[in-house]
Image: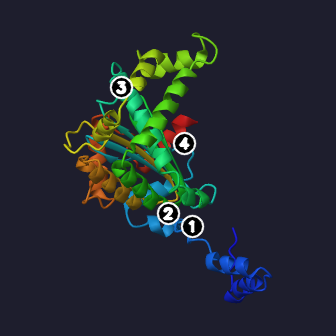
Amino acid sequence: YSMEAVPPCLIEKWKSYLDESHDKTLSSAWRDHFHLPAVNRYVPTDLQLMPDGVFQQSMRDRHFLAIEKIEQCGPELLIYSECMKVYYKLDRSFSLPKTYITMVFEHPCIYDETNATIWVALQALIDTFEQHFASRSYAPELSGLHFGLTRLQRGLRLRVNGYSQKVMAYVREIVDEFSTFVLDAALFESQRKLLIRRLKNWIVDCEDHIPYLAARTVMFGTLTREQAMAAAEKLSVDDVRKVRTFLFNPRGDDEMKFYALFTGNLPPNAVHECVQYIGDKFHLRRGNGNTSDDDGSVAFYNKHKSLMAEQKFLPLPDQQSIEYRYTFSK
């Protein structure tokens, strides 16, 4: 990467070319519209990797630093509650100050295999939002920030990756907009027609086409292409709003489940802040996951010991378990 300052004298020189134009009308018009591009607030200004000293504040942080270079040690559970599981892995292997985030939101009302309307409504919600958000995602894309929404059998997956300095703020912007954007009727209708077209092209050759069989057998259970098309034909904006209401559940009834993976150049504290925001946004009970008493010492280990006893967690992150997993992998 390189950055070069543009001195004011150079800008004045460019403007002088317009003043010297023989076409005075054109010159005046150009002067009125001549300006620099708007500042891209997503461009990172800090491209440095986090120093090891950031991970010396607690036993928990030192543990994640210790296993960073051990290939056999994958992401480990950082936050656990009745409604969420969040995994974390420090990764600076390629000296890139980037962060990779995957979030999955599940709700039992969404993965009802007998209700094709919910299936197509969630897809229509994703397609409509991506079109709505396209202009706002242009500047982040230029700055190396990328996001993607995918409909899953049991809910919704959001992936965001990019430079660590800006990626967390971008996650909040996406979730905020996704939860509040106005479902425009005309935009929805165009996306509904495109969805119907995609369903018609689902089978490329014939009924025994492998992708069709795999999708129906493995992913969508009893839902057939014909059922999805029939639901898409009758789909309304209200159906899409209902699905979004399921996701952003205001009741906080523990039906919404949240799973996430954070990897890259970011500290555990940043993960906690992001998860706290997600928990408030989706009305999730964080339980022992949002641990104000979690200073990375006794509370952290006692908590995970109890989870291990219930077989709900990976091996306790201490030196002995690290050596055991390394030997077992070999």
Mark 2 vs mark 4: give the one in front: 2
Categorize mark 3 by other alpha carbons within 10 Å: few (<14), some (14-19), many (20+): many
Residue at x 36%, y 54% (from the top left corner): 176
Q: Nearer the viewer, mark 4 or mark 3?
A: 3
Q: Earlier in the sequence, mark 1 or mark 2?
A: 1
What is the C-alpha distance between the residues marked 4 and 3?
Answer: 43 Å
Q: Residue furthest right?
A: 22
Q: Earlier in the sequence, mark 2 or mark 4?
A: 4
Asked if the residue under mark 2 is in contact with the one under mark 3, i.e. CB atoms within 8 Å, the reply is: no
Query: Could you say which disc has been placed on residue 72 in the image?
Result: 4
Element carrying mark 4: loop
Neighbours of disc 4 within 10 Å: few (<14), some (14-19), many (20+): some
Label 1 belongs to which residue? 43
24 to 98, vertically: above or below? below
State whether residue 229 is above or below residue 190: above
Asked whether the residues under the numbered discs 4 and 1 touch, taking CB atoms below 8 Å apart as contact, a structural biologist would say no
Disc 4/disc 1 C-alpha distance (Å) = 34 Å
Image mark for residue 166: 2
Identity of the amino acid at label 3?
Thr
Tell me where residue 274 appears, x and y as whole percent: 37, 56
Residue 117 numbered tag: 3
